[in-house]
Structure formats: C-alpha cells, structure tokens
Image: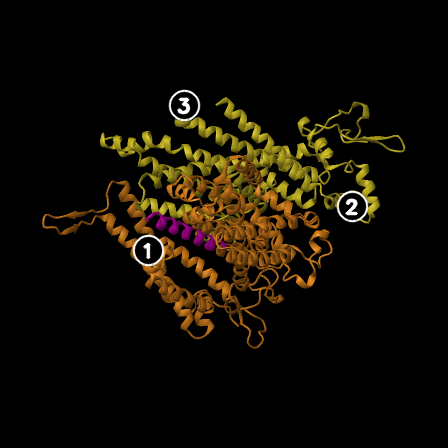
Chain colours: A yellow, B orange
Amino acid sequence: MGLFILRRVGVMLLTALCLTFVVFFLTNLHPNLEKLAKTQGNTRMSDAEVASWLDRNGYGGPLILRYGEWLGVVPGWTREADDGTVTGRCIDRGMEPGDAPAFCGLLQFDLGFSTVSDDEVSNIIGGRLGYTGILMFWAFAVMVPAALLVGVLAGMREGSRTDRSLSTFAIASTATPEYVSGVIFIVLLASSQIGVSPLLVQWGWLDGGTLFLGSARSAMDDITFWNFTLPVMTIALYGMGYIARMTRASMAEVMTAQYIRTARLKGVSFRNIVLKHALRNALIAPFTVIMLQFPWLLTGVVIVETLFNYNGFGWTLVQAASNNDIELLLACSIVAVFVVLVTQLISDIGYVFLNPRIRIS
Amino acid sequence: MEPLTWSGALGPFLNPIMLAALVVFALGFVTNMLLTLAGVRAGEVQINPDHTLTMDRTPVDYALMAMKYAVLLFVACCVGYIVGGMVMPGLEAKGIIGGMAARLTPVWIALVVVFGLSISFKRKLGLYGKLFDSPIGMVGFGLVMFWIFSAAFAGVVATHGPIDVISQMRNEVPGSALPAPDEGMYPYYLLGGDNLGRDVFSRMIYGGQEVLKITPAATLFAFMVGVTLGLPAGYFGGKLDTSITFIANLALAFPVILLFFLLVTPEIVAAGVPQYMSMVLFVFPIIFFVVLFNSRYHTQAPKRNLLVAATLVIGLWAYLSLISNADDPDLPLIFRLWPKPLDLFDIQGNILIVFVSVVFVNSPTVFRIVRGIVLDIKTRDYVAAGQTRGEGPWYIMLWEILPNARGPLIVDFCLRIGYTTILLGTLGFFGLGVSPESPDWGSTINEGRRLLTIYPHPALPPALALMSLVLGLNLLADGLREESLKD
C-alpha cells in the first residue's frame, strides 16, 4: 500500500513537471513576449527595442533556465543598469538588492507579479479561489446527493419504469452543457419578460422583479438563495447525469450479486437489502467518478462564472488568457493542473482503500 | 404587416387539446406516485387453470394508461401542427410553428422515407436494423437525422442567408414582418432577429450545418489517432505501452478549457503551434491505412504494392495540402514549402485550429478505450489461434481484434460526436470559434447571452438545437448499446 502511494505520487510529480513546462513553453513563446513588451513598453517599438526590453526584464535567457527560475530551482536573474540600479526577478519594488533572496519561484511560493492587475499573483489567485471554492462547495452539495439518489433509485430495480424514466433524465442532463442549461435557466427563471417570473408577478405571488437573479455578481459579497441558485444549479445539472449513470450501473451490478440473492431468500425486506447490504458496495465505483468530476467541473466553473459574471477563479483564467497576463495565467494553470492531479491521486488511492478485495490482497 | 402568431389558425383548436393533455399527464403522474407510495402496485398477469391469461387492473394501471394516452394526444397535436403548416395556405394561417414546419418540408419527407425503408427492411440490416426495435434508439436516431437532413437541405430550409443583415430587424421578436421585403424574399423573420438584425431561424439551420461539418470528421480523426496508438499499446504492452499511456495521461490531465485558451490565442497561432500539432495528428490516418492494407494483402505482393502506393500518394498529397498554406506569410517556413499549384485546398486558419484542438482533446480518451478493449480481447482463443497460424501482430490487431471491438467503439463514436459538439460549442461560447460571423451554435449563444434577460429569443433556439442534437446522439448510443448487448 505504502509503495503504491509512493509510486503514484512520483508519477504525479513527474506529470506536474511536464505539464507546467508545456504551459510555460506555450505562454512564453516569442509572439507572447513581443506582445508583452509592446503593452508594457511602447506599442511602436522596433524589433531591436523589443529584444532589448525583453533582455532587460529577464525574458532573454534560454527557456529552460527561465523555467528553472520560475520553478525556483535556479537563482533568479539580476541585472545592473548603467546608472548602478540593480533590478532582478527576486527584487520587489522598493526592496534593497542585498535583502532579496536568491531563489524565488513556485517552490518558494512566489508566483510573480501580474502585469495587468498590478498586484502579486498570489493575492489575486487566493481571493478568487475562495469565491470559486464556495461555488464548488454548493455545486457538490447539490450534485452528489441528488445524483446518488437518482442512481440508486434507478439501479435498485433494473429495467423498471422508474429506472427507465430516471435513466432518460440522466442522459438528458449529460446532453445539456452548462452554457445551454444556464441560458435556459436564465430565460425561464430570471427574465422579467418571459418565463415563470412574469406569471408569478401577474398572479401576485411575487412583487416585481424576478424569481432568481441572472447575475451572481452580488453573490461575491453576500450569498443568498436569490442570486446563487442558478449558477449552482447550472453546474450541478451537467455533472449529475454522469455520476447518476455510473451509480446506476454499479448499483444494478451489486443487485445481481449472490449475497443479495441470499439475503432475499432469507427474507430480508427490500428496503433493508438496499440500504444495508447493497448501498455500501454500490458506492465504491461512484466515489472514483465523483473525484474524477473535478477536472470537468473546472470547465463548468469557467463557463458558469463567465455566464453569471461571478469573479472567481474561472473568470480570472479567462481574463488572464485574453489579456496576455503571463504570470497570472501560469499560476492559474498550476492550480488547474494541481486540482486535476490531486483528485486523480485521491480517486486511485480511495478506490484501493475502499475496496476490501484489493485492500487486503 | 401584422406579426405572426405562434400557432396561427390552428392554435384555437390544438392549443386547448395540448394543454388538456399536459394536465392529464401531470395528474396521472402525481396519482401514480401517490398510489405507489401508498403501497398500491400495478396489476399483474395471472395464468388461470384453463391456460388463459387474466390481467387485473389496479388504479395505478389506470393512471399509467391516462399518462400514455396524454402523451399520444400531445404527439398527435404536434404532428397536426406540422401537417397543418405544410398544407394550410397563407403564412398568417400557418403561424410561426406552421411556417417553420412548412420550411422543413424536405426534412420531414426525408425522415419519413428513411424510417419507412429502415423499418420495413429492419431484419436484413444488422445492428442498424435492430436499432428500430428500441424506442429510445429510434427517438435518438430521429433527432440526429433531423439535424443531418436540415443541414443537408439548409439552402432550401433557411429563409434568409446566415449573414444577411436587415438593420431595422434588430432584436425584433419572433414572427416579425420585414419592413420592405423585396420580391421573392421571405416576408417574415420566423424566430426574430438577433442583435445585428440577422434571421435567428436561418442562422440556427446554417449553424447546424457548420457544426455537422466539423464534429463527425474531428471525431473520426480522433478515433484514427486513438486506434493507431491504442492497438499496439494494448497488444504489445511493455515499455511502448507505458510511454504512450504516460503521454495520454499527460494530455488527459491538461484542463480542457486551459488548452483551448492557450491554443486559440492569436500569439500562439502566430507561432504556428496548431500547425505543428496538425502535422503530428494528421499523420495517423495515413499510418493507419497503410498498415491496414499492408497487413491484409501482405501475401499478395502486387495488390499490396498497388494499394499501399495509392494510399501513400493520395494520403500524403492530401496531408501536405492540408497542413501547408503557401499564402499565409505569418506561418513558419516549413508550412510554406509545398508548391502552390499542388496545394489542393487550404483550410481557413481558424477551422484548422478548432479542428486540431478538438481532435487533440478527444484522442487520449479514445486511446484509453481502445487499449482497454485490446487488453481484454487479446486473451481470447481466436487471437491465440491466429498467433498459432503464424499471423503477424498487425494483422491480428487490425483484422482480428479491431472488427471484434466494433460494438463498443461504434457506441463510443456516437457519444463522442455529442461530446465534440459540446466542446465546439464551448469554444464558440468563449468567442474562440470558427469565425466571429460564423452561425455555429456556440458562437450564436455567446452573442445572444449579453441581452439574455431582455431579448431571450436569439440565444434560445441555438441552445435548444445543440441540446437536442447531443441528446439525440446520446439516446442513439444508448439504443445501440442496448441492442448490441442483446446478441
């Protein structure tokens, strides 16, 4: 078990190293740097000026060295200008060159400086991740219980009418990506022109306004049922179908097992069979699936935050990518890659840990 | 002119019936649920001593029956609208729904022909015929074929061009009449105008064409890549398997959305990254076909030489035409070497990028599926028999294992087209799609979402269209899976 975990962690670190290098390479291609120089310096710089600007600001060295600096395993660059001022990667504004550390990179938790927002990347990312964390939490709190319930109900009597209707619902939910369900929800529930809200106003059940709010911007200060329901529902709906189908398959398989038949023949009630005998074994496979949903949710979060104007992590990623904010984009990808890899690791280890057949052998 | 109503002249008759059907269905559903919770069960068939069958009916059965007939009534009303739209004279009488149904006439005819032929010959059509035994599969197939036919007949179905702008029609509601229609021009915007004054209905139809042009081809390429790499990885195992699996896992761990943003940004396009990726990805189909023919006709040298040479010439020519574009001076030199007279076609920059990113995202998953199936199948006796006969490894992989893996692969192919459609829509939603003017569904949703709460009509049709196509593909895959498991 220990060796297994160790090996998984090793592979994970290697994967992380490769992926961060790919992202670093893609964000530090020459056209990106040229654009950066032109936005930071002067739009009408000549090629020679661009080259000298890049050289002055530490983008001149070979790619692998800069990657090392960014990672924090190679000492940060320093440069002495003609007038004697020393600048360097690790020398923050207003800091004495002598006090600056030699290494500053990912390993030292220094993610650099966002050129567009004029702030430390770690400050920006930290706050944004908090917002997204809340969104993810509620999405999971809605999605997982609902999906497990649908899956168990459908799988406990395979082929029954309940099974068929719930399975069709699950298929429909996997066919509705966030940008479709979000649009439908907003039109249906958050528009003052059509949908449910005008009807409710007309019947006097709602005084003015709409049933839900179509923008989650106000949820950043104060989360209410009114402004946060739609984003949470939108994320939860797309992921739900997949988990429900996996739960159903696993439940249906368990229900045909020998020990369930034995319990039936002994006269255990159907309710007890489902709740006490089948459920625990049926939930092992969905656990893996739920953990592997995180990477998918990442895409969902980006879409939903853009659609509902919620300035979380996904929104930051979109902004960083479209503004050529290299350091911020790198930090975003680190977080994304980290989330994906850690959830994969947890799902692998969790599967082994939960499944007694594998754990004991 | 007066704007059209939704249901036209048939509305006063059919709408109350549809409403009644809905109410009956809801009542039946609630009653059924309450009765089931109260412990009443549906009636069961009983075998009498004289070998006759008796079915006792309980209230649950009556509730279910009411639901069934309500659904049938509802469907009948929908058919009534379609037929009414096709036969009734005058656009005012047809209404918006009837008007759309009338425009879609070629699609209905094609659907009826396909279903009629398929159902009458279903016993001779193998797996495809069996699809018509499962209602779910039939619904899915119908939805998919609807969009395929409407894309094929887009020129006849659409009322206006996808980028024809009539500026007075900006954000007009569905059914609005054109201010001054020219002779022969369709006088209404059936589903209203978008924020630039283009016809929403026509853009939805042309958008379907745009989507169906890209997604099946992209999925096919992803399958070629996945199959070409997955077969040897699963069959040979060892170091080859470890290294390819590691690379596939790398690609899988890469967050899709980040990859899209990275690949589609202008700076990265200018550096030629998508072109290099296309250079790698498009080699796989050529390898696949060369190996396919080579292993099959290995013993018949003349035939083998002919087929392999033909594949190589056609494949490489298409490959070089595809990846190189001599006209684009921004590209790295390597993509401008292929002489222009020999360049058969150029793919517009953005389509190539979108295509490559979608293929790249899909192929690692296909690889894993193929590898898993091969690992399972290679333990079978017929593979061992092939090995004893002295068949080469590639022959076994491509002509013994692959045909036997077709069931799960076909099912996954349907699912994956749906997933690719969603990915393409995601790209469009972030404005990274084919082109800013393109009518594809993701881009139209993106344009429509800004004024969504005030003018919902431009964003809703493409959203529902995308959903119905993906739903159709998923149901089709489900039906195919069910029917192929019955063997």
Given residues A262 and B38, the one toward you in this image is A262
**Please, which chain is the residue tagged with disc 2 on?**
A
In reply to whether residue B375 is colored magenta, the answer given is no
**Please, which chain is the residue tagged with disc 3 on?**
A
Q: Which residue is tagged 2? A: A38
Can residue A184 be seen at all in this image of the molecule? Answer: no
Q: Which mark is residue B133?
A: 1
What residue sits 71% from the left and 57% below the top?
B328
Q: Main secondary structure of the magenta part?
A: helix
Q: Residue furthest left?
A: B50
Type of amino acid under label 1: Asp
Secondary structure under badge 2? helix
- The answer to whether marks 1 and 2 sit on the same chain is no
Q: What distance separates the C-alpha of mark 3 from that of mark 2?
A: 61 Å
Residue span colored magenta: B466-487
Q: Position of residue B52 (x, y in %)?
A: 13, 52
Q: Which residue is tagged 3? A: A360
**Please, which chain is the residue tagged with disc 1 on?**
B
CB under 8 Å between callouts 3 and 2? no
Density class for disc 2 (Cα within 10 Å; few <14, some 14-19, many ≥20) is some
Density class for disc 1 (Cα within 10 Å; few <14, some 14-19, many ≥20) is some
In reply to whether residue B479 is colored magenta, the answer given is yes
Q: Nearer the viewer, mark 1 or mark 3?
A: 3
Q: Nearer the viewer, mark 3 or mark 2?
A: 3
Q: Nearer the viewer, mark 1 or mark 2?
A: 1
Decide if residue A323 is on the left or right side of residue B467.
right
Type of amino acid under label 2: Lys
Which quarter of the figure has residue B112? bottom left
Can residue B316 be seen at all in this image of the molecule? Answer: yes
Q: What distance separates the C-alpha of mark 1 from that of mark 3?
A: 45 Å
